[in-house]
Image (tube, helix red, strand yellow):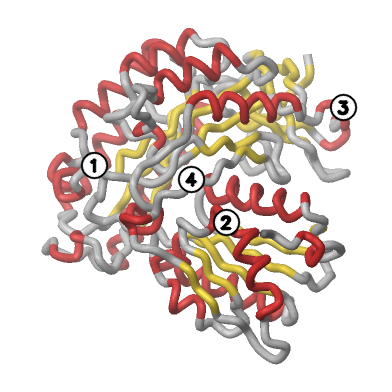
Amino acid sequence: MIDSAIFQGKTARFYTLGCKLNFSETSTFARCLFDMGVTEASKDEQADICLINTCSVTEVANHKCRQAINKMVRLNPKAFIIVTGCYAQLESETVAQIPGVDLVLGSNEKADLIQYLSNAWNSKPTDGSLHAHHTVSTKNIKSFQPSCSRGNRTRYFLKVQDGCNYFCTYCTIPFARGFSRNPSIASLVEQAREAASEGGKEIVLTGVNIGDFRTDSGETFYRLVEALDRDVEGIERFRISSIEPNLLTDELIDFCARSRAFMPHFHIPLQSGSDEVLKLMHRRYDTALFAHKIELIKKLMPHAFIGVDVMVGCRGELPEHFEASFNFIESLPVTQLHVFPYSERPGTTALSIPHIVDEREKKRRAHRLIELSDRKTQQFYASHIGCEASVLFEKSIKGKAMHGFTDNYIRVELSPDRTKEEYDNQIIAVRLGDFNFDKSALKAEII
């Protein structure tokens, strides 16, 4: 039984690290607390409850999590501090011993965060921290917390799947999130309809390995996409977040090209353009399959935005492997690269692979790919100058430029003197102009 009375009049502060899925889940946690009478703490106010939702994709991410927890404790010394997320699952005992932390919840327990908080609230010592932690082993992570939230953003993020069965050699996500699982298509359609009833125009489908969506009744990710496109009125744009190339079927690409509301925008993890390295990573595709997916997308949707994840400096990546990877990526008509250096993760099988790339070389390789990404993105943007486009605008700070995105994810900017409140969360026709001052967007004029 949750004692909601204890939360009346309390304030809360939230901090999220990592992926869009984490942001969506944090927003759901916040909504649950707000429904029980909690309000968000103001900028200069000390909160009664603090929640940190963590990431553990790299050692740098772990370090940022510890920094965020320590800062939250320092700025809110009397608050009840809760830590959840991937770092909390993988290092629960370590996190629980951080001074000021009261409650650590793993990936299975966070679905019942409010219940755990209610149970522990009165147990917090008056002169210290509770240091409680609750986690289960990977095989026992089975809960699925529904989440469809926008937080402070215009776009909604609908969690359609969690966990992963792939166990790539460099990755700890399956250990942190558990095995792949998802709810029914009917429940997700209902959540999307609720977002539409709240005035939502765009939904991003999120998860850990969303293409692995499936149920015992034969439901698949393709059927989910079909149902959302057909059965959810009011949502004018759907976007598919990161999807594995071997799960991005030709049938799905073809459907997106002719669908009512799925945008010409894909994010596809490549990780390496070297087949030898892909084998070391235990990825489930090769460069030929990846190139085919890009070719088909561009054939059916010539103006599609294609983002690509690339890892550099993983164990076993010899100089000739990186050069092959760079040349392969350079040859592809992709739009933007998300580049990150390999990070040693405890417990992963990658640690047994010979040949370690030193940190200086990792940075050099990452820098080359980031420069390549900048060239490709600017070329893509430049090819749209002078074109007409529909833009979903986001609320701006008074006196600042208003921004939004086209259907194919080009960032657009309206000058402050043209910013109008009635454009917020509206899809408006514009003509795309030249780059803004830092080349992060194209200027636009309302048609």
Q: Which of pointers 1 and 4 lies earlier in the amino acid sequence?
A: 4
Q: Residue tagged by mark 3?
A: 422
Question: Marks 2 and 4: CB-CB under 8 Å?
Answer: no
| Quadrant hosting residue 8 | bottom right
Query: Disc 1 or disc 4, which is closer to the eye?
Result: 4
Q: Residue at x 55, y 58 (%)?
A: 17
Q: Which of pointers 2 and 4 lies earlier in the amino acid sequence?
A: 2
Residue type highlighted by circle 4: Phe
Q: Residue tagged by mark 4?
A: 144
Q: Which of pointers 3 and 4 lies earlier in the amino acid sequence?
A: 4
Name the foreground residue: 393 vs 369: 393
Q: Residue tagged by mark 2?
A: 112
Element carrying mark 3: helix
Element carrying mark 1: helix
Seen in the image, is 280 located left or right of residue 340?
Answer: left
Q: Residue at x 46, y 15 (%)?
A: 256
Question: Marks 2 and 1: CB-CB under 8 Å?
Answer: no
Disc 2/disc 4 C-alpha distance (Å): 10 Å
x and y, in percent, of residue 188 in the image: 55, 29
What is the residue that sits farthest to the top in this orientation?
A: 258
Q: Residue tagged by mark 1?
A: 325
Question: Marks 1 and 4: CB-CB under 8 Å?
Answer: no
**Neighbourhood count class around disc 1 (C-alpha, 10 Å): few under 14, some 14–19, many 20 upward:** many
Disc 2/disc 1 C-alpha distance (Å): 44 Å
Residue type highlighted by circle 1: Ser
x and y, in percent, of residue 203 in the image: 60, 29
Q: Which of pointers 2 and 1 lies earlier in the amino acid sequence?
A: 2
Disc 1/disc 4 C-alpha distance (Å): 37 Å
x and y, in percent, of residue 254 in the image: 39, 12
Residue type highlighted by circle 3: Glu
